[in-house]
Amino acid sequence: MYKDKHYNKCKSGSFPRYEGQSKKGKAHGEGLHCIKKDEYYSGQFKNGIYEGIGYYFFSNGNKYFGEF
C-alpha cells in the first residue's frame, strides 16, 4: 500500500473531517479530507468541492492521481 505524508493523519479521530485552507467557511485551496479510516483526498479544493489536481486514497489500498 502506498503511503503519503497524510497517511497517519487519517488513521484515527472523527470522520469525516477537513484540514487545510478555507474561504467563507468552505474548503478552498490546498487541503486534506479524511473521509473514513484509511480513505482520504489530498489536493485542491474550490468552494467546498474537489477541484484541480489531487490524490484520492481508497481504504483498499488503491489510489487515483489526477484532475478532479
Image (cartoon, grey):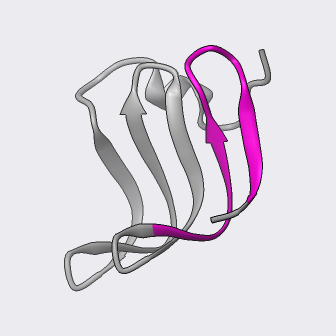
Q: Residue at x 36, y 18 (%)?
A: 12
Is residue 57 shown above or below 53?
Answer: above
Would residue 3 be found to the left or right of residue 57 on screen? right
Q: Residue at x 59, y 37 (%)?
A: 6
Would residue 3 be counted in the magenta stretch? no
Would residue 36 be found to the left or right of residue 6 on screen? left
Q: Residue furthest bottom?
A: 24
Residue 31's x, y, as percent? 50, 60
Residue 55's x, y, as percent? 68, 49
User: Image quadrant for the N terminus?
Assistant: top right
User: In the image, which residues are magenta?
Assistant: 50-66
Would residue 45 be found to the left or right of residue 22 on screen? right
Q: Main secondary structure of the magenta part?
A: strand
Is residue 30 shown above or below 16?
Answer: below
Residue 41's x, y, as percent? 54, 46
Residue 56's x, y, as percent? 62, 43
Would residue 63 be counted in the magenta stretch? yes
Is residue 18 shown above or below 63?
Answer: below
Is residue 2 shown above or below 19?
Answer: above
Q: Residue at x 62, y 65 (%)?
A: 68
Q: Residue at x 74, y 25 (%)?
A: 3
